[in-house]
Each structure stands twice: as C-alpha cells, then as structure tokens.
Image (tube, rainbow, N blue to C red):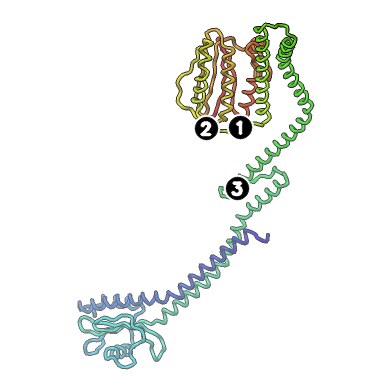
Amino acid sequence: MRYSIRRQFALVFGLLMAGTILLCWFINNTFLEKYYLNNKQKAMMSAYFIVNKASNEGVIGTDAFDIEFQKICGKNNINIILLDTETRTIKTSMNDYETLSRQLLDYLFEREGTFGDKLLASEENYEMRIKLDARTQFEYVDMWGVLDNGNLFLFRSPLESIKESVDLANRFLAYVGVGSAIFSAFIILLVSRKITEPVMELTRISERMSHLDFDARYEGNSKTEIALLGQNINELSRALEAAISELKSVNNELKRDIEKKNKTDEMRKEFLSNISHELKTPIALIQGYAEGLMEGINEDEDSRNFYCEVIADEAAKMNHIVKKLLTLNQVEFGNNTVTMERFDITALIQNYLQSAEILCRQKEINLQMESYPPVHVWADEFMVEEIFNNYFTNALNHVAESKVIDVKLTLGEKTVRVSVFNTGIPIPEESLPHIWEKFYKVDKARTREYGGSGVGLSIVKAMMEAMNQKYGVNNYDNGVEFWFELEMS
C-alpha cells in the first residue's frame, strides 16, 4: 500500500530514534568537556584540602599518607610537588620533578610568559589556571600556592586526556547510535507488522461486508484497541445482517400489502356501508317529519314544535356522528400532528370534573375522586382530554345501580394509569375484543337511546396508538373500568 501505516509507523519511530541520538551527540560534544573540566577542578580542590590538612598535622612523611598521596594522584591523574620555604623538595609524585619545581618557581615569582590564558580560580593562598605547554603544545590545569604551614605546592593535570575521553565518548556514541538505529529499525518493522496485520484483517473483513458477505468475523483474542475495534465490527456485521434481513422482511410485507389492496377497497365499502346505516335512520326521520310539516298533517302549534324538535335532534345526532368520524379519520391517517408536551394530568382531570359536576348532580350520580398531587406527563394534551372525555361520557351513559363513577390515578415507576370506573352491567366477554371497532355497539337499543355513535372508543384507540401508549378495559362484578397510561416526566 502506498500510504501504509506500517511504513509511516516505522518512519516516525526511525526519525524519533535518529533525532534522539543526534541530540545526545550534540549535548556530549557541547557540554561533556566542560563537565569533565568542572570535575577536574573539584578533584584538585579536594586534593588541596587533603594535602593542606596533612601538612598542618605533620604527617606528610608517614607511610599512611604515602598511600593516600598515591591514591589522589592515580585516581585523578594529578602530578603533585611540595617544596619547603627554601625550595627543597618535600614530596613529589613523579621522577622528573625538576620541571614541576621550575614551573612552580616561575608561577611564584611571576616570570613573563608563565601564566596561561584562562583563570579558573583565585584565592589568597592559591590560584588555578589552564596553561599551554610551549614545548609539547599540551594544555594543563595547574594549581599552585602556599599551604598554611608555609610550604609551596603545585598540582598539574593534563587536559589532553579529557579531550581524548570526550572524543572517544562521542565516537562510541556515534557507533552505538548507528548500530542501535539499524537494530531498532529492524525491531520496529517487526512490531509494526504485528500491529498492522490485525488492521489488514479488519480491512479485508470490511471489504467483504461491503459486498454483503457477513460471515467474516474477527478472531483476534488480544485486549488491545484493535481487538476492541474488531469486536465492534463483528457486532456491526451482525447488526447489518439483522437489518438487511428485516428490510427483506419489510419488502415482503410491502408486497403483501399490495396484494391486500383489494381487501382495503372492500373495507372502504364496508365503512361507507356503516356510515350509510348510521345516517339512514336520522335521515329518514328528518325526511318524514319534514314532509309532515310540509303537508300540514298537524296544524296545531304544539305538534309543529314537536316535529321541529325531532328534526333538530336528529340533525344534531348526524352532526355529532360526522364530527366524530372526521376526528377519527384525521387521527388514523396521520393528519393530526401529535404534539408531545409536559402538563399536569391531575389538573386537567380536576378541571374537567368540575365542569361535569352539575350534570352528575342532575343525574344523581355519585362522582368520586381522591386528592392527588400534581403529576406531570409527556403527551398531547388535546388528545388526552378527548380520550378522558370519551371514557367519562361512556361512564355517564352506562352508569347504573348505585350510580357511582370513580376516577383514579395509579402511579408506577415511569407511567401513570388513569382509570374511569362506573357501576352497572359488565360488558359481555364476547364483546370485549370488538368494543374498539368503529360502529360496534354492545347494546344497540341503549346506544340509540342516548344518541351514541359507536365511534368514541375507536377514537380512543387511534389516539392512544398515535402516542404509543397503553389502554384497555376491565370487567368487574359491579361495573366496568376503562383505563389508559401516560409517560411521567
């Protein structure tokens, strides 16, 4: 691959390795010599304090100090000469001590051309400088002065060994760096291959998925992010397979729906037939009483008023049926937008019952509802009011015996159930599955008596299904309870 992650991975780590080695080389080349020189100064100062202390204590000539003296010179690569006040040699670390003796005297008497170019330290009793030897052209760190007891001293350490050590360290770092870079590049290629192989496997799986082949699965069992990605791709593959299966099922259902077109036409005819049946009686009554008025069958005013009242009453019933059918049609065909809003269902029911209280007193109905706190729900407030109106109107029309209507709110974890119970005759078991159907009437004579259209519960069903909420009916020995549930907020 032209833009392989493996190559990019190896390149980035190779550049990082090379940059690190170059940085280390630069730091060594720039600061290592200074670091060595600083340590050399500390070593000379430490040697000065040891020799000065031994001189003060008078142990310069002892065997114990000879051992300490040799350790100082050998460990720190320092040549030392000590002279008394008459310039006689007391102690030295080298055989050719005359050169050091002359150099010390030159420093003490400040002869011309004696001092080096760089002063490192200067105190009352000693001075430290870097000096270039004219004969050998080597640089030395020289420290000279007077001890506390008056003896003279000179410490000398060559700088060439420091420079050689720095050069050697830099060359060694370069060799090690090149070797490490080559070895690291090889290791990086192996590691990047191990990392990119699962990625390539996921690439092949995704390619098979793009051709709707969902049998491929990632089999890696590591706990890395790539393994997690592979598991997610496996889940995605299963989900896509299920989705495509579902789409094929839906497509099959669509084909079946097309086949049901003729059945839908029959249902439309049945609907029109039901409407015709429901409207036939009031139309016939209106027509008959209107013809009677036109022919003057009863000329007295009371009879005419009676005829007019019948006509107005039947027209009102027809208007009520038409309005109910329009509402049902709008809900069933999605013409009504369901507006989900937050409101207090307790307040809505209490306000409705207050307006219905006078009607309940006229019919001598005992209306019962306990005191409930505010219960906020998410629903279409207009639809909920219409649903409760249908339930309550149904209870008013069918209440019997002790004439009790009981409204309850039952709180669950996430929902509230609103129920309307009325005493009376239970609904026959064979009618329960059909009461939500359009124009279905359990007792046609009674329904006709109070002007029912047989559409109210169909409207309840359509509205509750539009809000995706539950509804139902329960039979009791002494009455019937209709209920619906809403989601609490």
Q: Residues within 10 Å of mark 2 (few under 14, many from 20)?
A: some
Residue at left offset 27%, top offset 82% = 126
Q: Residues within 10 Å of mark 1 (few under 14, many from 20)?
A: some
Residue at left offset 57%, top offset 15% = 395
Residue type, numbered disc 3: Leu
Residue matched to label 2: 342
Kindly state the secondary structure of the residue where label 2 is placed: strand
| Residues marked 1 and 3 touching at CB (< 8 Å) | no
Residue 349 drawn above or below residue 6:
above
Residue 338 is tagged as 1
Residue type, numbered disc 2: Arg
Residue 155 drawn above or below residue 211:
below
Residue at left offset 64%, top offset 14% = 451
Sequence order check, earlier mark of 2 and 3? 3
Residue 251 is tagged as none
Residue 54 drawn above or below residue 106:
above
Left or right: 137 as drawn, with respect to 107 = right
Work out whether residue 67 or residue 371 is closer to the camera in this orientation and state it: 371
The answer for how far apart the CA atoms under marks 1 and 3 are is 40 Å
Residue at left offset 50%, top offset 16% = 357
Residue 229 is tagged as 3
Residue 489 drawn above or below residue 80:
above
Sequence order check, earlier mark of 1 and 3? 3
Quadrant position of the N terminus in the picture: bottom right
Work out whether residue 427 or residue 309 is closer to the camera in this orientation and state it: 309
Residue 156, quarter of picture: bottom left
The location of residue 239, given as percent across then percent down, is 65, 40
Work out whether residue 218 or residue 164 is closer to the camera in this orientation and state it: 218
Kindly state the secondary structure of the residue where label 3 is placed: helix
